[in-house]
Image: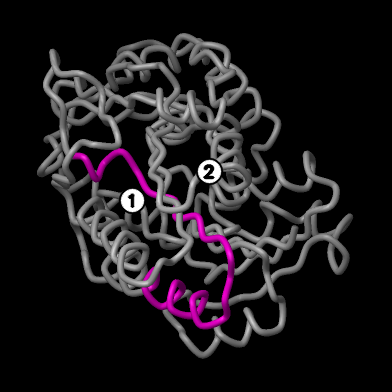
């Protein structure tokens, strides 16, 4: 199978490429990435060294650039496209929503139109649980039938992309599948997200900023479990279907932070509560029973073991962490948390 993977230098895309190379020897991957601040060629340097020019290829391009996308599809002729490319950080979407609309909505439409024109037989669009909005403490987990009620510019842009995918399916018979996942964690995650940010702050013995009272709840999924689910959807999912993936691991933000401090041997006195983020969703939880029935999906990682493994990965890859903790990232994070 020949796969075009967009956003393959980002966190989940990187792990998905690694999953494909390791588990499907007959699969060839073309990684299309714009290389924004969160996209890092170092994520796949070893894959490039071992498989570059045979099973792995890279093209720098923007999914919103129709001419570039059309040219790449014509040259590579993929059997499927998996669209990870997205602006994904909620805080950044509050600071400036425009890039989120451009990449997440327009980019998805441009990519689908090019795929439709080229007759690509499979398209998997990667979305998020945040499109469903926020759950109350006593409400059941999100199913694929929940309405879309996004509360941040980021989640609104992802919901817009999901609706565009649905429109292509219903109007054109476009062969797309949508997957929605809970909060990912694991190797190669950019350190503006909660778990790698808190690991880094704990090592530095700096303040660990926690929004509000820290009681916002997320369902956590190890990125390897998510990649397994996407692979199942790619290879056996039904056209037009939506599949939720979760980790069966609901935890409050403050409990996650305290678990990281315990693993790093640092005191809870490092926790600093900061002004809450505007529109901060209270709880996410994913019902993945449809994916379990139709695809055979079940998460393999417990949160406790997955978090310990993630910490160990960052310990063994501090050079990578130091490399990405620079420039625009540090400037933005300093300004954002200072304002909060």
Kindly identify which residue carries mark 2. Answer: 237
User: What label does residue 122 carry, if any?
Assistant: none
- Dot 1 alpha-carbon crowd within 10 angstroms: few under 14, some 14 to 19, many 20 or more: some
Q: Nearer the viewer, residue 83 or 52?
A: 83
Q: Nearer the viewer, residue 239 or 126?
A: 239
- Relative side of 207 to 340, left or right: right
Q: Earlier in the sequence, mark 2 or mark 1?
A: 1
Q: Residue furthest bottom?
A: 67
Quote the CA–CA distance across marks 2 and 1.
28 Å
Residue ID at (41%, 17%): 248
Q: Does residue 167 belong to the magenta stretch?
A: no
State the image coordinates of residue 288 (x, y, percent, origin top left).
40, 26
Of the 4 image quadrants, the one containing the N terminus is bottom right
Considering only vertical position in the picture, is 65 above or below 186?
A: below
Q: Nearer the viewer, mark 2 or mark 1?
A: 2
Residues in magenta, as a range: 107-132
Residue ID at (40%, 23%): 289
């Amino acid at each position: 199978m020949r796969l075009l993977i967009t956003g393959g230098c980002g966190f989940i895309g990187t792990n998905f490429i690694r999953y494909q190379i390791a588990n499907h020897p007959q699969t060839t991957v073309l990684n299309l990435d714009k290389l924004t601040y969160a996209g890092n060629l170092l994520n796949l340097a070893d894959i490039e060294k071992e498989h570059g020019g045979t099973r792995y290829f890279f093209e720098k391009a923007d999914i919103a650039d129709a001419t570039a996308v059309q040219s790449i599809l014509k040259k590579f002729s993929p059997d499927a496209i998996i669209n990870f490319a997205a602006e994904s950080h909620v805080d950044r979407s509050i600071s400036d929503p425009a890039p989120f609309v451009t990449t997440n909505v327009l980019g998805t439409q441009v990519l689908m139109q090019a795929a439709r024109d080229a007759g690509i037989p499979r398209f998997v669009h990667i979305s998020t649980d945040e499109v469903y909005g926020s759950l109350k403490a006593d409400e059941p987990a999100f199913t694929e039938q929940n309405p879309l009620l996004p509360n941040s510019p980021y989640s609104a842009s992802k919901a817009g992309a999901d609706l565009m995918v649905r429109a292509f399916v219903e109007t054109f018979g476009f062969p797309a599948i949508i997957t929605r996942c809970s909060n990912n964690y694991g190797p190669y995650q950019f350190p503006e997200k909660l778990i790698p940010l808190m690991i880094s702050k704990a090592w530095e013995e700096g303040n660990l900023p926690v929004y509000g009272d820290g009681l916002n709840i997320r369902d956590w999924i190890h990125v390897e479990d998510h990649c397994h689910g996407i692979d199942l959807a790619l290879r056996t999912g039904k056209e037009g279907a939506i599949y939720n993936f979760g980790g069966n691991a609901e935890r409050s933000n403050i409990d996650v932070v305290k678990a990281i401090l315990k693993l790093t041997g640092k005191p809870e006195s490092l926790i600093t509560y900061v002004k809450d983020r505007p529109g901060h969703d209270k709880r996410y939880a994913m019902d993945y029973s449809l994916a379990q029935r139709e695809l055979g999906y079940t998460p393999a990682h417990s949160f406790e073991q997955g978090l310990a493994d993630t910490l160990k990965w960052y310990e063994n890859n501090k050079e990578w962490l130091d490399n990405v903790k620079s420039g625009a990232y540090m400037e933005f994070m300093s300004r954002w948390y200072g304002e909060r």
